[in-house]
Image (tube, grey):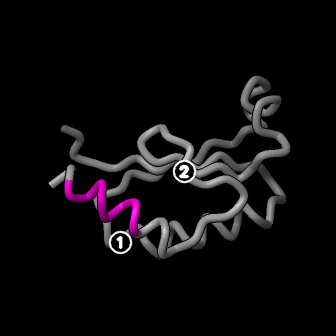
Amino acid sequence: MPTTIVIEILTKNDCCLCDDIKEIVNRVLPDYPVKLVMTDIESDPTLYEKFKERIPVLKINGIESFVYKAHETTLRHKLDGLKQEVI
């Protein structure tokens, strides 16, 4: 059973939606056992081709959970369910 929830944000430079999703994640981070991973799609040509018009993408434990926007309440609800599995 995992001891940490992994949140990965697929992002790129000069992306206002990416900034918004990062802000939401940073607000909820203190309340959950989360490891945050930031992945710059511009550093990997394969990722860039796959996600160039579909960012930001927020993955929770490897599963795409939000695309373009995240809602804090929905993110907390998803993390609450996973937090029970981690404890």
State the predominant SS element of the stretch in magenta.
Answer: helix
Q: For residue 27: magenta?
A: no
Left or right of 61, for residue 47: right
Residue that extends furthest to the top in the rendered view of this protein = 46
Amino acid at dot 2: Ser
Horizontally, residue 67 falls left or right of residue 2, namely right
**In what element is the residue under mark 2?**
strand
Q: Quadrant of residue 19?
A: bottom right
Q: Is residue 82 magenta?
A: yes
- Please name the residue shown 34% across and 50% down the image: 5
User: How far separated are the C-alphas under marks 2 and 1?
Assistant: 19 Å
**Quadrant of the drawing holding the C terminus:** bottom left
Q: Position of residue 82 (x, y in %)?
A: 30, 54
Q: Tell me the residue that label 2 is attached to.
A: 65
Label located before the other in sequence (2 or 1): 1
Q: Does 48 appear above or below 86?
A: above
Number of marks: 2
Q: Residue 73's x, y, as percent?
A: 48, 75
Q: 10 Å neighbourhood of mark 1: few (<14), some, or many (≥20)?
A: few
Q: Which residues are magenta?
A: 77-84
Residue at point 68%, 64% (across, down)? 69
Q: Which quarter of the figure is the N terminus placed in?
A: top left
* Rendered view: 14 above or below 3: below
- Whole-percent x, y for residue 77 in the image: 39, 67
Q: Which mark is residue 21?
A: none
Q: Quadrant of residue 81?
A: bottom left
Q: Is residue 48 left or right of residue 86?
A: right
Mark 1: which secondary structure?
Answer: helix
Residue at numbered disc 1 = 30
Measuring 65% from the left and 46% from the top, which residue is drawn there?
A: 10
Q: Who's the residue at 78% across and 38% down the image?
A: 42
- Bin the neighbour count of mark 2 within 10 Å (Cα to Cα): few under 14, some 14-19, many 20 and up: some
